[in-house]
Image (cartoon, grey):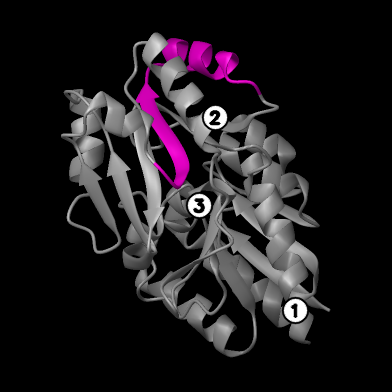
Amino acid sequence: MSHLYISDLDGTLLDDSTRVSERSARLLNEAIDRGAFFTVATARTPATVEILLQNIDLRLPAIVMTGAAMWDHRTSRYVDPQLIDGSLSRKAVSVFRESGLEPFMYCICSDMLDVYHHGPLTAEEQTFVDARSGLKLKKFHLDSSPLQVAEAENVILIFGMGDYERLSRLADRLDPAEYSVSFYEDNASTQYYIEVFAAGVSKAVAVQRLAAMIGADEITVYGDNLNDISMMNVATDPVAVANAKPLVRTAAAREIASNNDDAVALDVAANFLSHES
């Protein structure tokens, strides 16, 4: 049996400049080269994960889109994507629109992501899109008609952003028997994000699936935000970084330094060395 190490990205492995430092990359690559099973679990899509982790020799699939799929960067393929049923996708779009919000529809097409959106963008949405445009594995279709959005096929994620009150009311209207809903605050702004997935999707389920794939009987998980708590709850060693939100720190068994101090990489290196010896 083996030990699996899984880190969230934003606010955890990435520093406040949204980068993996040279030191962190070196420490992780040394551990991976010696046999450590390390990967990430993130709300991000492969389009940005590939760029952010380009200096890490990641040999395991990355858990992406909050567990809706894994991404094998060696083959540039999605692994076991969990798509939303078409009728439920259309139903969710109606709930978004009744709440005064136009959703972004993330659809898998030949291991690419097509993202459909209708109508003008808020300033916050424009900033979000600008930071993710022009990427190899993702294409935004911002001139989509209302029907194109509602009838989108192969939907893996329905995404929205806004203030806490609006998104909280929207989340309450989505039946947990039909959808998995992730609702959390953005690390870099005052905006909140809502992610709607097929029922049963979570970082926790994906972590357990990956652990079973490699035969891991120990799982160390590193996190900082509310959408990390589910995977921390299934870990044998749940770890919070010092900058984590209070509820995440409560869910953790132990705490390490902040995301700006190479804390995850240092802990993986030290933990793996202790298990080697």
What kind of element bears circle 3?
loop
Tell me the quarter of the picture where residue 4 sits: bottom right
Which label sits in the foreground, 3 or 1? Answer: 3
**Residue 18 visible, this angle:** no
Which label sits in the foreground, 1 or 2? Answer: 2
> Residue at 34% of width from left, 54% of height from top?
113
Give the label on residue 274, or none. Answer: 1
> Residue at 35% of width from left, 63% of height from top?
52
> Residue at 65% of width from left, 31% of height from top?
247
The amino acid type, in three-letter code, at marker 1 is Ser
For label 1, count other residues whose C-alpha is less than 10 Å away and answer few (under 14), some (14-19) or many (20+): few
Is residue 50 rendered to the left or right of residue 92?
left
Instruction: Give whichever of 94, 138 is nearer the camera.
Output: 94
- Disc count in the image? 3
Image height check: is 151 above or below 72? above
The amino acid type, in three-letter code, at marker 2 is Leu
The magenta segment: 153-175
| Quadrant for the N terminus in the image | bottom right
Image height check: is 178 above or below 214? above
The amino acid type, in three-letter code, at marker 3 is Thr
Is residue 59 rendered to the left or right of residue 256?
left
Give the label on residue 88, or none. Answer: 2
The image shows residue 84 at horizontal and vertical percentages of 54, 40
Residue on which the image places disc 3 = 42
Please report contact status of discs 3 and 1: CB closer than 8 Å, yes or no.
no
The tag earlier along the polypeptide, 3 or 1, is 3
